[in-house]
Image: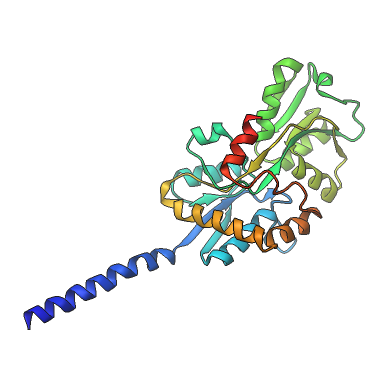
Amino acid sequence: MKKKLIAVLLTGAMICGAAIPAAAADKKWTIATDTVFKPFEYTDENGEFVGIDVDIVAAIAEDQGFEYEMKSLGWDASIAACQAGQADAMIAGASITDERKEKGWMFSDGYYNATQSMTVKADSEISGFADLDGKMVGVKTGTQGAAYAETLKEENGFEITYFEDSPTMYQAVLGGQVVACFEDTPIMASSIKDGNLDLKIVEGTENEGAPYGFAIFSENSQELLDMFNEGLKNIKENGKYDEIIATYLGSAKDSTEETGTEADAEEAEEE
């Protein structure tokens, strides 16, 4: 009888142990974002989160069968929340760079390749970086647009002022507080078009760009990162990815050609 009881208890323990991974799979992940980054993430007229990043996460979650909650925290706050363990990951048009990796960012495979450009008022006579000598330009704190401007600052003799969000930066250009700003090209193009802003992207000022990545800051979120990569591969293969890109940008051209793997991202950085 004792042997039978021990066997039953051991069997029960094994069953409970086997159930642990299933329970972990039922975790509801928290994903931070910055919803003033149209067309990748923004809030529509109904107060709903929409955009390329939002739809990509939704498609991947459906493909991989996980639950999540997306929180609009802003760029800096999203990073801080992930670093503090208050969010599991972030997606907010974050470019994959070696500098960020060195600071503890862990990226997915790239999901969209974006350049950065300079934008000025529509009636501005500024036609290139040389025209910025002695002037003030605006950038968004901690972004690739800021990093791009910083590489051009000394050679072209301009000063930089930093903003916490894109809309405030655009208004600074329109109001004359700065003569230009640096921003991700697709974001700026969308903002000008949809907001009917009296701005223009200066032709020939874009850089080579880098892919955007889904990011985590702790190995505790590795499972989520792995699911993102697997799901991204699947939605590219089944056409859902192209459908999402076309919804917001009208074409999937150039959005996947250079963003297939982390190796691709590193190659892009080296060029």
Res 110 seen here: yes
Which of the two residues, 180 or 95, is positioned nearer the viewer here? 95
Q: Quadrant of the N terminus?
A: bottom left
Side of 18 relative to 190 (left or right): left
Q: In front here: 13 or 184?
A: 13
Vertical side of 26 occupied by 259: above or below: above
Residue 38 at x, y percent in the picture = 73, 50
Q: Is the residue 49 above or below the residue 110 in the image? A: below
Q: Residue at x 15, y 77 (%)?
A: 7
Quarter of the image with the C terminus in it: top right
What coloring was used for the rendering?
Answer: rainbow
Furthest toward the left, the residue is: 2
Q: Nearer the viewer, residue 192 or 17?
A: 17
Residue 12 as seen in the image, left or right of residue 245: left
Residue at 62 percent across and 42 percent down: it is 94
Q: Residue at x 87, y 25 (%)?
A: 126
| Quadrant in which residue 159 is drawn | top right
User: Is residue 141 in sight in this rendering?
Assistant: no
* Position in image of residue 134 (x %, y %): 78, 16
